[in-house]
Image: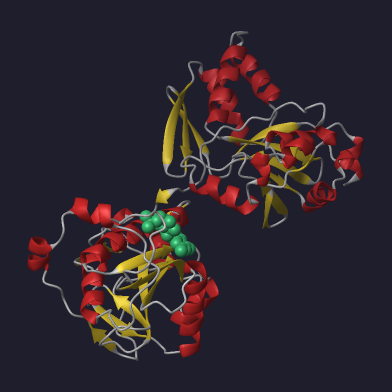
């Protein structure tokens, strides 16, 4: 740390966050964030202008108060200033900044979105605390942003201060930095780190969980089309690959409507199957299942040019980023290999064939289902991140995991009606998926797997169901 920081008593000032703008309104102050706007009523123009002066240069709240009292000449302005600053803080307008004279900002307590930001007093035990095991640090030019899923608050530190935090040299940090770290729950007691609550979480899981599930916690959350100005949307339909394509049989839906078991029967009969009969799964069954569960019925561009798709199962924004790869081991009428289901053409597109990769996929699913033979079919599900993330911000990954669940259940119930058995699988292998499909893992990646085939009736049901 620089000697100036050690030598001088330092205090924080309020600064308007870069993604927020404040503007005067006849009835107060208009606050504009990313994708939202709100009027904060201020009855006195003098107080309003004093608060707005923070736009020109960061200042302590005491300076805003001084300016308001000077402009209004009325002591009651003090109460009004406090309530306006509090209201703006609740909307996440300010960050608390610690400046080192002559050297710019060294630490900032901040948030994203429209969440409250307030700096708490330094707790007496601050220097006995430890860096939270939930802390996640990301880098920006010139600073390290430290946060955790325990709080929506972030602390941006100059790298030399971050190094002191990591080294546990808390005595070398100025009080306001310690106060920021405690406020953001980044310095915690040793007892907390040993608690069940902390030990059950992985830091990045908790961080991701909060980020994906805090709708007011991001500058841009939901279907913002944030990349629309810079990139074209990725079309839904994919061309037939060089290896060709295999048309699948189309089931007779009119007959299925008449002959299918009722939904109540299907739901009551549904169960997971992990053992299958050899040589019994047909291309008609596979084609019928894929058609009934996963085909595309219509495709149209939405008003921003993104293809939206009508399929038998629902999908947020109708983007339908889940793609199905079919690993065929034992299906009459279809050569063993790795295929991609083309929902718009109801066909299996032939991918580059590699028996070693197919064997590794089979080994993977046999471990997780304790299978002795490769299942007739393995379904590998990928998510086309490049389609989903062109539109959605802040929560697209969480959204696609919900879609995987929708796909699993749709396949479970349709398999019952086709005399097929399936079992969902919780894990998957990103690297194996990339090798099997040839897709760049940042464009499309593994999000699920299922095994599928005609069930072996001798398989014992784990629940003792008939
Ligand atoms: C998302 C998901 C993941 C699953 N993962 C596995 C798995 O990795 N291995 C396995 O043998 N079964 C797996 N299953 C099947 C469950 O174990 C099964 O649904 C549960 O035991 C209830 O039995 P039932 O489906 O027969 O009603 C999974 C099911 C789902 C929905």
What residue appears at the point 31 percent right and 69 percent down from the top-left corner? 457
Looking at the picture, the colour scheme in use is secondary structure
Relative image position of residue 128 (x, y in whole percent): 84, 35
Task: State whether residue 387 is above or below residue 363.
Answer: above
Quick one: 187 or 22, which is closer to the camera?
187
- Relative depth, front residue between 211 and 423: 423
Residue 320 in picture, x, y percent from top left: 32, 63
Q: How many marks?
A: 0
Identity of the residue drawn at 86% across and 31% down = 9
Q: Answer with left or right where residue 17 lies relative to residue 45.
A: right
Q: Quadrant of residue 94?
A: top right
Please state, as top left, top right, bottom left or bottom right, where the C terminus lies in the image.
bottom left
Which residue is nearer to you in this view: 117 or 415? 415
- Quadrant containing ligand 1 reads bottom left
Q: Residue at x 30, y 70 (%)?
A: 236
Give the image quarter of residue 60: top right
Answer left or right for 306 relative to 96. Answer: left
**Residue 227 visible in rendering:** no
Does residue 267 show up? Answer: yes
């Amino acid at each position: 740390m620089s000697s100036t920081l050690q030598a001088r008593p330092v205090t924080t000032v309020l600064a308007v966050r870069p993604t927020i703008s404040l503007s005067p309104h006849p009835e107060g102050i208009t606050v504009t964030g990313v994708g939202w706007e709100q009027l904060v009523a201020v009855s006195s123009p003098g107080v309003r202008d004093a608060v707005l002066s923070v736009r020109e240069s960061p200042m302590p709240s005491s300076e805003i108060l001084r300016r308001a009292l000077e402009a209004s000449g009325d002591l009651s302005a003090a109460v009004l200033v406090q309530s306006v600053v509090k209201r703006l803080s609740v909307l996440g307008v300010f960050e608390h900044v610690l400046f080192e004279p002559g050297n710019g900002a060294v630490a900032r307590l901040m948030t994203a979105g429209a969440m409250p930001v307030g700096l708490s007093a330094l707790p007496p035990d601050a220097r006995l605390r430890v860096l939270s095991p939930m802390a996640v640090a990301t880098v920006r030019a010139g600073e390290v942003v430290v946060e955790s899923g325990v709080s929506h608050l972030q602390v941006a530190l100059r790298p030399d201060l971050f190094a002191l935090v990591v080294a546990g040299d808390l005595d070398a940090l100025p009080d306001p930095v310690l106060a920021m770290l405690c406020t953001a729950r980044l310095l915690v007691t040793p007892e907390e780190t040993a608690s069940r609550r902390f030990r059950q979480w992985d830091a990045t899981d908790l961080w991701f969980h909060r980020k994906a599930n805090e709708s007011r916690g991001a500058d841009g959350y939901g279907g913002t089309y944030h990349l629309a100005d810079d990139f074209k949307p990725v079309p839904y339909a994919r061309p037939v690959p060089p290896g060709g394509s295999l048309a699948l049989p189309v089931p007779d839906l009119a007959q299925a409507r008449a002959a299918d078991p009722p939904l109540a029967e299907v739901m009551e009969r549904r169960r997971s199957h992990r053992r299958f009969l050899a040589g019994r799964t047909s291309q008609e069954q596979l084609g019928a299942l894929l058609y009934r569960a996963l085909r595309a019925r219509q495709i149209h561009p939405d008003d921003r040019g993104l293809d939206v798709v009508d399929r038998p199962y629902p999908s947020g924004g109708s983007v339908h980023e889940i793609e199905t790869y079919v690993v065929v081991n034992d299906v009459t009428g279809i050569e063993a290999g790795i295929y991609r289901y083309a929902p718009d053409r109801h066909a299996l597109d032939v991918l580059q064939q590699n028996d070693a990769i197919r064997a590794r996929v089979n080994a993977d699913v046999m471990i997780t289902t304790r299978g002795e033979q490769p299942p007739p079919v393995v379904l590998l599900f990928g998510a086309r991140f490049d389609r989903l993330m062109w539109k959605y911000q802040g929560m697209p990954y969480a959204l696609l995991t919900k879609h995987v669940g929708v796909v699993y259940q749709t396949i479970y119930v349709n398999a019952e009606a086709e005399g097929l058995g399936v079992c969902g699988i919780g894990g998957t292998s990103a690297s194996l998926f990339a090798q099997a499909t040839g897709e760049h893992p940042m464009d499309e990646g593994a999000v699920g797997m299922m095994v599928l085939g005609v069930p072996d009736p001798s398989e014992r049901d784990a629940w003792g169901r008939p």
